[in-house]
């Protein structure tokens, strides 16, 4: 299993590299925060659903990856101030 995990991590790192290169901060003049909040929530819950699906199929590596994505969307939403913790 460790070779499987290592292979997946290598795959994810290779896919992530171009996403992080050249990132620039942009701030729209009038952001539609309500729309952004709903999109972030949709993404977070979509990845959570994927994580559950992968888990049920016994694909634990992809389940974990999807769960991390879901949590990342929640964290980003919290940092932007469009989500709050109960």
Image (cartoon, helix red, strand yellow):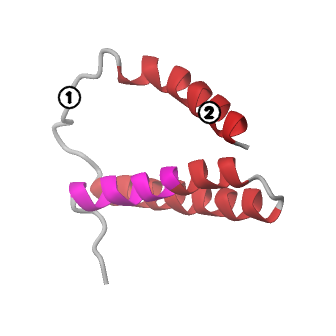
Quadrant position of residue 10: top right
Q: Earlier in the sequence, mark 1 or mark 2?
A: 2
Quadrant position of residue 40: bottom left
Q: Which residue is mark 1?
A: 25
Residue 24, horizontal then vertical, whole percent: 23, 22
Rendered image: mark on residue 6? 2
Secondary structure found at label 2 = helix
Q: Classify 50 as above or below 52.
A: above
Magenta span dominant secondary structure: helix
Left/right of residue 6 with respect to residue 35 in the rendered view = right
Depth order, front residue of 75/11: 11
Quadrant position of residue 21: top left
Query: Residue at the spot x=22%, y=56% of the render?
Result: 79
Query: Residue at the spot x=69%, y=65% of the render?
Result: 52
Depth order, front residue of 28/68: 68
Region in magenta: 68-80
């Amino acid at each position: 299993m460790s070779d499987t995990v290592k292979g997946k991590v290598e795959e994810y790192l290779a896919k992530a590299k171009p996403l992080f290169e050249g990132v620039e901060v942009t701030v729209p003049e009038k952001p539609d925060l309500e729309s952004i909040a709903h999109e972030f929530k949709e993404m977070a819950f979509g990845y959570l659903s994927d994580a559950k699906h992968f888990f049920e199929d016994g694909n634990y590596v992809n389940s974990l990856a999807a769960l991390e994505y879901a949590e990342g969307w929640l964290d980003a939403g919290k940092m932007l101030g469009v989500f709050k913790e109960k």
